[in-house]
Every structure is written in C-alpha cells, then in structure tokens.
Image (cartoon, rainbow, N blue to C red):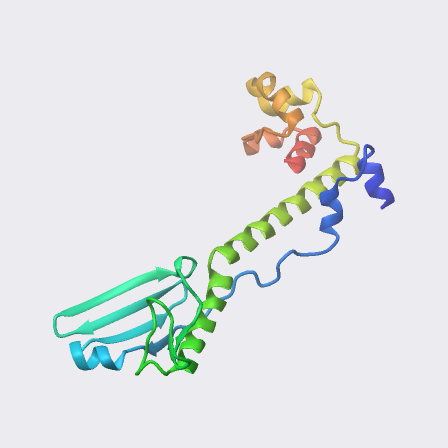
Amino acid sequence: QEMLKEVYKNGVPAWVSMLQNGPLHVNAAQTFPSKEYNVTNWAEMLMFCICRTLTLEAEELVLQQKGPCLEVNERTAYANVDSLDVETACGCFATLPDLADPGCGCSKELVEEIANELTDRNLKRGDAAQLKMQENVTFELLKLDLKTDMLVNKRAIAYPPDQEVMSRVFGDEAANVKNDLAGGAYVPSINAQTLGAGSDSNNLMKLA
C-alpha cells in the first residue's frame, strides 16, 4: 500500500484495488465434446417420414431433418439459440421450442438433458462467455498499466520524456506526438535500430 501511495500521489485509483482480488473469471470459456440426439417426433415420422437429429458441436448446434423429399441442415451458434426453456403441456408433453420434440411427446428427461447441455454451452461458448473473456483481457491490460506506473516511479523515468529524448527516439515525429504521449493516446512505431541508440531509448521502449 505504501508503494502504491508513492506511485499515485493524488490517490490510488479504484481499478488498482480491483486487481488485488485476482482474476475476474476462471475458466471463462470451456471446450465441449460433440453430442448427438435423436429428436424425431413419432407422429411426424409416421405422417411424413421425417427424422430429426440434433448435434451439439463445439461452437454451434446442427438440426438435421431428413425425409423422402427433404434434407435440411440448420446451424445455429449457441449465442443465437432463442429459447432454452422446456415447455410442458397436459403435465406430460415436453418440448424445446424449434429444436426438440422427441418421441410421442413424453420424453421429458431427454428434453431436459438437451436443455441443460444447451444452457451450459450458451454460458461457456456464447455471448456470456465472450463478455467474460473481454473482462479478463481488460483485467490483464490494467495489470500491465499498473506495472508500467510502478516501473516509471522506481526508475524515476520522466514521462512524457523531454524534447531531447523525444527527438532521438521518434525523429521527425517528435513534435507531433509530444501532446499525445502526455495524454497516453499515442502508440509509437519505433524501429529496432533507433531503440538501440541509448539507455533513454531503452527506458522508453520498456514504457511502451
């Protein structure tokens, strides 16, 4: 805490305290094995000879419909599945809208198993997982920002650097980027030959 107060003389930012709690989301994304379910509805089979197969792949589900004059494969990303709720009627008939209505309608355990699998994959591979991974990336960037601030303080590096160092490192760009460096908005493109010019250049490389 004393070191943080020395680095941030105007007050320790709130995001620094957040970093002390560790990673935001452990195992934000997860890989799933492929699973296949026979979701053929018997009435539809008897009347139209249509069979349905639901395959849960790593990133999306595939609903295959086959019949004498029909063969359709519908692919849907887990984030785009409309409904994950099992619907029941008459206390027995169970269905997962637009996806699974297997057997004679009384295969509730099978429908609930599919719904649970889809819910898990939606959380670990869908929008929710992507959001968690983005938050983890932000967390790592903030950690890098904190390390940079501590390095600048420990080595007493002037940031933004003075005009002489700016000219040596950035050459003709120095006058244009000085204000952006002060605001933290500039990301310089520095060639390796220039960076080897001196110790001040190397210090700036570490800051970048």
Query: Looking at the image, which is closer to me, 139 or 85?
Result: 85
Rendering coords of residue 124 (x, y %): 51, 63
Residue farthest toward the left in the current orientation of the protein: 69
Task: Reply above or below: 163 against 151.
Answer: above
Q: In which quarter of the image is residue 93?
A: bottom left
Task: Reply above or below: 144 against 130.
Answer: above
Rendering coords of residue 206 (x, y %): 67, 38
Residue farthest toward the front in the current orientation of the protein: 90
Does residue 55 appear to the left or right of 12 in the view shown?
left
Rendering coords of residue 103 (x, y %): 31, 82
Rendering coords of residue 134 (x, y %): 55, 50
- Residue at 44% from the left image edge and 66% from the top image edge: 84
Does residue 108 appear to the left or right of 199 in the view shown?
left
Which image quarter holds the C terminus? top right
Q: Quadrant of residue 145?
A: top right
Query: Looking at the image, which is closer to me, 72 or 166?
Result: 72
- Residue at 48% from the left image edge and 55% from the top image edge: 127
- Residue at 38% from the left image edge and 71% from the top image edge: 96
Does residue 15 appear to the left or right of 1 in the view shown?
left
Task: Reply above or below: 67 against 150.
Answer: below
Query: Looking at the image, which is closer to me, 134 or 88?
Result: 88
